[in-house]
Image: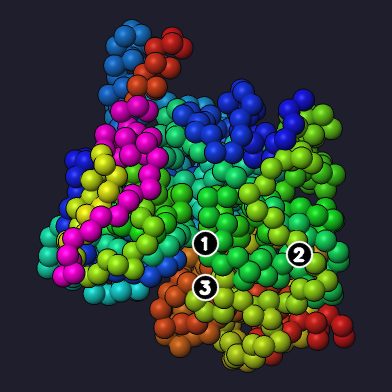
Amino acid sequence: MVNNQTIVEKIVSRAVGKTVHAGEHIEVLPVDKLYFNEVIAPPAIINFQEDFKSVFSEAQQKNSGEISVWGEGGKTKLKVFDPARVCFIPDHTVPSCSVKVAQGVNLMRQFAADQGIKMYKEGDGIEHTVVTEEGFVRPGEVVVATDSHTDTVGAIGALGFGIGTTEAEYALATGEIYDFFIPETYKFKVTGDFLPGVSAKDLILTILGAVKEGGCSKKVAEYSGDTIRRMGMDGRFTMCNMSVEMSARTGIVNPDEITRDFMRDTISRHPELSQELSARMDAGSLASVKSDDDATYASEMDIEAAKIEPQVAMPHSPANTKPVSEVPDEVNVVFIGSCTNARHTDLAEAAKILKGKKVHPSVNLLVIPASRLVYNWAMSEGILKIFADAGANIESSNCGPCFGKHMGVLSPGDRCLSTSNRNYKGRMGSPEAMIYLSSPATAAASAIEGRITDPRRYVAS
Amino acid sequence: MNSRVSGKVRVKFGDDINTDYIIPAYILQEAWDKKFFADYAFERYNPDFVKICRSNKDNIVVAGKNFGCGSSREQAVYAIQYNGVNAVVAESFPDIFFRNSINNSFCVVKVEDVSDISLGDRLEIDLEKLVVTVDGPDGRFQKQITMNEEERDLLVSGGRLGKVKERLKERLLATN
């Protein structure tokens, strides 16, 4: 048994087949899973065809026609490294908001069909939510995807990295990334219970406010302590999701019984994955995906959960945080959604506050569940009805206005409170709009009042 | 890429310039051609950027810490690169932006402190010696570049594509 290792070092050691530690240069890192959204897949597919066509035809000639190419009269066929370990998820601006977006989605669909890659449909959900719910990404895996919020999958104990078009195109060909430096780990140890009305979002905003936008640069953020051990998967997703906002390489949580429950739930919906996932859930195999007690950390921070107040990130930085009690600012748009905060408990918390209430007359409340699974669950639980009765606009699952291209783009002068992860100037539309970030509970209370409101007033009553 | 890159400092930014500032999201899906993104560089953050770069050549951008943080969009690299910018010199870069730059043979170099580099200074970046020579009104001085040997070699040799093709070829021939 290998000792002195962080979960990151263990995952990389398993991937490269030898014991490695932070700081080491890994020339070739094999990846277990690779997924694409519709922002990056179209150029990556085109570049993949351009860059590797000659290699495939050369190999085809040498192998007397065994390898046949995609797309051009069926002469030479390009093949991705392993179609079962790749998936495509159109999520940023679907249903398609422009002709070019629609063309891109169709290009993905055609390529996926030809290669045998699983292509999800518009509305199936936000990529990072879908890959975990569907059992595509599993604890202990090395995962890369064309989005910086791939760190979200760290919540189930996978090592997820956001990559650009070129690295993704190379990984599509070989299943590898290159010249990887094993990052050190920054341990955030959280202890105690949250006060009512306080949730994972308030915790990660508190951490961001303390370490700032560059505060976890080059390092992985590992969340541990009894608060995290009791935290449900939805909260863990929120924590890991915003790790990149402090420039962390990724975020991660050691898998435990709560992770197993999450996987059991996946198996109940996908019995065909039972064998594979059960093997992963086996105590022995999960124990190998866990930081050792004597692992070495580059930095550590202790946080007391009970001291955390609901937080708001002020314009124009996610690290520009203040306690909600100090922010009485008016808002006219409230967005409950995104890969940060649109899962079951997020929507349930918001609905609890909005039940029987009306959205303030001057507020446009947008609610976008993170996936079709969450959407349909929220419908069957009556949660969507609570939002609808309150006067919310409910949209099919996608990234929504967080990406600044559709479903609620902001005008100059708009003041938006969002449960998403970035409030950069211009992120959701006009650079003259103001964007604030908060938890779903704070967003719901604020939608009722028309100004940023402490959710504890509603939680207590 | 040549191991010597030079130009004049045309734009200087502070810390934490994110890729949303470099290229806004709404334009990302509207083209699959890298050059397209040049027209939209810093559109919502510094609307003069494109004008300044287009009316000059051999431009260099200087920035503080954490240049290129946030979204993984590689279009941020194209947007700068295709405005005649030869290099970005900054106090630090987050990994995704740094790796995306190297993959496009775009010169990004890290130096300890940029406070003594001013607009209009002429910079000469020597990737062999890992020094930046700054030529300004107060004379000429040098700054050390922090860069791994692997990263430097990749940048000078023009990225990883050749290596990836080799690995793919080996695999294709081995499996048949």
The local crowd at label 3, few if under 14, some if 14 to 19, many if 20 or more residues have their Cα within 10 Å, is many
Disc 3/disc 2 C-alpha distance (Å): 22 Å
Image mark for residue A317: 3
Is the C-beta separation of discs 3 and 1 under 8 Å? no
Disc 3 and disc 2 in contact, CB within 8 angstroms: no
The relative height of residue A220 versus residue B68 in the rendered view (above or below) is: above
CA distance separating discs 2 and 1:
19 Å
Quick one: label 1, few (<14), some, or many (20+) residues within 10 Å? many
Q: Is residue A256 magenta?
A: no
Residue holding disc 2: A303
Identify the mark at residue A214; answer none if there is no mark: 1
Task: Out of A317 and A189, give the one closest to the viewer.
Answer: A189
Residues A392 and A22: in front is A22
Question: Is B138 in the magenta?
Answer: yes
Mark 2 falls on what kind of element?
Answer: strand
- At label 1, which amino acid type do we have? Gly
In space, the residues marked 3 and 1 are separated at their CA atoms by 12 Å
Query: In the depicted view, which residue is nearer to us: A230 or B148?
Result: B148
Q: Residues within 10 Å of mark 2 (few under 14, many from 20)?
A: some
Q: In the figure, residue A100 lies in which quadrant?
A: bottom left
Q: Which percent across, then down, holds residue B26?
A: 39, 65
